[in-house]
Image (spheres, rainbow, N blue to C red):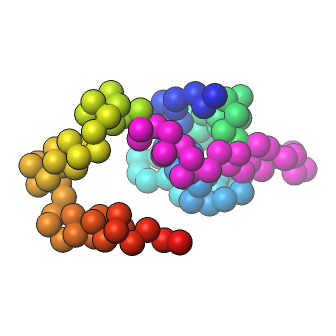
Amino acid sequence: MMEKLTIQEEEAMLAVWQIGKGFIKDFMDAMPEPKPPYTTLASTVKNLERKGYLVSERFANANRYGAKVKEADYKKRFMSGFVDNYFKSSYKDLVAFFAKDKKISAEELKEIINLIENPEK
């Protein structure tokens, strides 16, 4: 059972997924400004390990971390929850919402249709 992440935890995971395996300093470097304080990121990483999102291995006097949960699995799980909660399980309503708000272009919609009609094998 995947626990939902806080915004802070999600930002840390995005850095981990981007880097692959690394030390807290590596994840810090990959994060956008304003970067969290090192100690904050360190405790966020500890929480992520406790929640089962990260695994660590000891290197000299530091832990190297890697993702235990794939980015696609996380997104799949929480996007469907998001759509269930806000769009009554309708992806059509979700896309319509972004289209009305001009957050998605006709060009992008054509690309989405193409993805639906020609899923990668």
Q: Which image quadrant for residue 112? A: bottom left
- Total marks shown come to 0
Residue visible at 23% across and 46% down in the picture: 92
Residue 36 falls left or right of residue 111: right
Estimate the x, y position of residue 61 in percent, counting from the top left: 87, 45
Residue visible at 27% across and 66% down in the picture: 113
* Start-end of magenta stretch: 55-80
Residue 84 falls left or right of residue 37: left
Residue 15 falls left or right of residue 112: right
Classify 78 as above or below 24. above
Estimate the x, y position of residue 105 in percent, counting from the top left: 16, 64
Residue visible at 52% across and 29% down in the picture: 4
Estimate the x, y position of residue 36 in percent, counting from the top left: 50, 40
In the image, farthest residue toward the right: 60
Pick the quarter of the image with the N terminus. top right
Estimate the x, y position of residue 37 in percent, counting from the top left: 54, 39
Asked if the magenta segment contains residue 43, the reply would be no
Asked if the magenta segment contains residue 76, the reply would be yes
Q: Which image quadrant for residue 103? A: bottom left
Classify 86 as above or below 62. above
Residue 82 falls left or right of residue 102: right
Q: Nearer the viewer, residue 26 or 94?
A: 94
Q: Is residue 28 visible?
A: no
Q: Is residue 16 visible?
A: yes
